[in-house]
Image (cartoon, grey):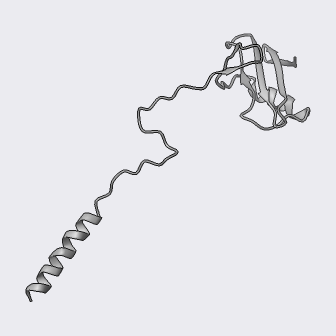
Amino acid sequence: MKQLFVLVACAVVLSGCMSVRRPVVKAWEAPPGAVYAQRQLYDSNGAVIERIPFRAGVSSVTVENMAKLEGCVGGTGAGLMTPQGPVEAYRMICENGKVYTAKCELRQCKKI
């Protein structure tokens, strides 16, 4: 009888230890608060290539439709390259690696 009591007590203790969950950090996820520096890119002359973050603008959809008519599709879309205002410049990177650029004045866009 004592042996049965000891076995049941051990089972209860072990099942309680198994139910405790620990947070799992996956290899592809950065730990909270981690900041990583972006790698610098250089052109053939040694000048630093500046990375511009994607920003959607008022005429992004118009420029994307213009690019689609010329066979340029894919990527994140047409991003605003200049500050918002009456004259804006947009850039879209196509699937084949070409770059489509357009200039929009008061929402009237033309290919550059």
Q: Residue at x 71, y 17 (%)?
A: 81
Quadrant location of the C terminus? Answer: top right
Quadrant of residue 3 within the rendered picture: bottom left
From this viewpoint, which residue is outermost toward the left?
2
From this viewpoint, which residue is outermost toward the bottom?
1
Q: Nearer the viewer, residue 40 or 35?
A: 40
Q: Nearer the viewer, residue 42 or 94?
A: 42
- Residue 20 lies, with reference to residue 72, above or below; the image says below
Q: Residue at x 70, y 11 (%)?
A: 85
- Residue 20 lies, with reference to residue 37, above or below; the image says below
Quadrant location of the N terminus? Answer: bottom left
- Residue 19 lies, with reference to residue 2, above or below; the image says above
Q: Nearer the viewer, residue 42 or 70?
A: 42
Q: Residue at x 69, y 22 (%)?
A: 57
Report x, y in % for residue 29. Answer: 49, 43
Q: Residue at x 74, y 10 (%)?
A: 86
